[in-house]
Amino acid sequence: MRVLLPHPLLSAGLLVMWLLMNQTLQPGPALVGALVALLGGWALLRPGRSRLRRPGTILRLAGQVAVDVVRSNIGVAKVILLRRPDRRSGFIRVRLTLRDPQALAVLAVILTATPGTAWLEFDAGEGWLLLHVLDLIDEADWTRIIRDHYERPLLEIFR
């Protein structure tokens, strides 16, 4: 069974996503979705083996992300609705200690899912992250947020 489904949760997620995107449970699309899920889990998407540690840190990080997403939604709404001239968007470079591919993927999801920020590029050799920020007031503040709110807990979780 492990040969057919080396990553059953990944395959199940791909199947569910396929069915949701097609908005049908008809046999044809469901069969194609099952094939995509099998191939995706078997050949295309072989995630590395990371051990997750510190479940309490995972919960704190999830809470921090939820709070930051709400704050960021409010901040983006203010930027769009109020159009203050002292606000500017821009690019910042943040040097990261994080090197684990799964941890970097989680960080990319967090930063891109947070309104007003977008992960653009990561230089694995040097550890530089290029990030676009909609409301860029202080680069040092953004660097502190990324390191303290996200990178530090991810280092604990993925060690």
Image: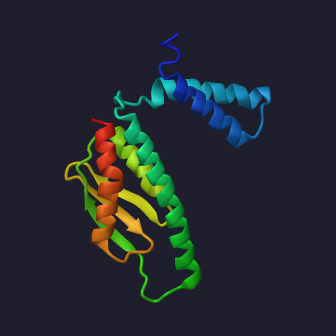
Residue drawn at x 43%, y 74% is 135
Residue 26 lies, in percent from the top left, at 80, 30
- Of the 4 image quadrants, the one containing the C terminus is top left
Q: Quadrant of residue 56?
A: top left
Q: Give the color scheme: rainbow, by chain, secondary structure or one colour.
A: rainbow
Q: Quadrant of residue 34?
A: top right
Residue 19 lies, in percent from the top left, at 70, 35
Tell which of 159 and 103 is nearer to you: 159
Tell which of 45 and 68 is nearer to you: 68
Up-down: is 118 above or below 150?
below
Up-down: is 71 above or below 127?
below
Tell which of 106 and 33 is nearer to you: 106
Up-down: is 148 above or below 99?
below
Residue drawn at x 35%, y 35% is 54
Left or right? Give the position of 76 relative to 159. right
Left or right? Give the position of 115 relative to 105. right
Residue drawn at x 51%, y 26% is 41
Up-down: is 11 above or below 159?
above
